[in-house]
Image (cartoon, grey):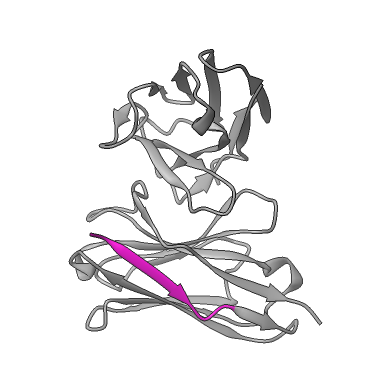
Amino acid sequence: QVQLVESGGGLVKPGGSLRLSCVASGFIFSDYYMTWIRQAPGKGLEYISYIGNSVSYTSYADSVKGRFTISRDNTKNSLYLQMDSLRVEDTAVYYCARGGVATTGHFQHWGLGTLVTVSS
Amino acid sequence: EIVLTQSPDFQSVAPKEKVTITCRASQSIGGSLHWYQQKPGQSPKLLIKYASQSISGVPSRFSGSGSGTDFTLTINGLEAEDAATYYCHQSSSLLTFGGGTKVEIK
């Protein structure tokens, strides 16, 4: 069965950095678009970034553009999110989700999320 | 950026009643609209893909309709386990989510 397991969250000071990981299993990872989505405490879902299956294509929400970098290692079935210049408003649960083969599409599979807290 | 506006924000409904949630896009997205259910402390769960396509394992009381800019999620015969927040999501241009609709059991 498809599994997505995020890790790397924690407490970090404003201006700091954190690297999130998402390890995938149960499907051919290299075939699929992958996406990071976050949810601030008590708030709704917010798209952060996605990466194409060929690695060459990436996209970012304006709120994180220039600060966050998405990447993937298909040999390790892993998705990453490097988060720099963190702000208090980046505090959220970060989910990775599997998209489609030819496009991001819908998200049928989600991880359980990892909590990132940005606070001094 | 395509903005998705959900309504209502909150709905309190008695069991067995019908629930209708709407999602309006700021520009046409064809049929690239998906619906999710999220319960407290859980990850979102896909209910409907591409406006009206059902998902295996999702109860048949959940259905979706619409195209272009106006979409609807319907729950026919609300059950206690359906208490949750529901989100729409568009994948036509970049990605955006609606603000969510919280459904409470009366």
Horizontally, residue A71 falls left or right of residue B40, namely: left
Relative placement, left or right, of B82 versus A91 is: left
* Image quarter (top left, top right, bottom left or bottom right) of the N terminus of chain A: bottom left
Q: Residue at x 68, y 78 (%)?
A: A86
The residue closer to the viewer here, B80 or A59, is B80
Q: Is residue B85 above or below residue A108?
A: above
- Occupied quadrant, residue B14: top right
Residue A3 rendering spot, x and y as whole percentages:
31, 64
Q: Is residue A116 magenta?
A: no
Question: Is A67 or A37 nearer to us in this picture?
Answer: A37
Magenta stretch: give its range: A1-9
- Residue projecting furthest to the top: B17
Note whether A84 is above or below B99 in the view shown: below
Image coordinates of residue B98 in percent, x first then y, are 57, 39
Relative image position of residue A59 (x, y in whole percent): 44, 64
Location of residue A105 with respect to A69 vertically, above or below: above
Which residue is at the front of the view, B23 or A11? A11
Asked if A39 appears above or below A29 in the picture, the reply is above
Specify the quadrant that holds the C terminus of chain A.
Answer: bottom right
Residue A112 appears left or right of A99? right
Q: Residue at x 29, y 30 (%)?
A: B54
Quarter of the figure with residue B41: bottom right
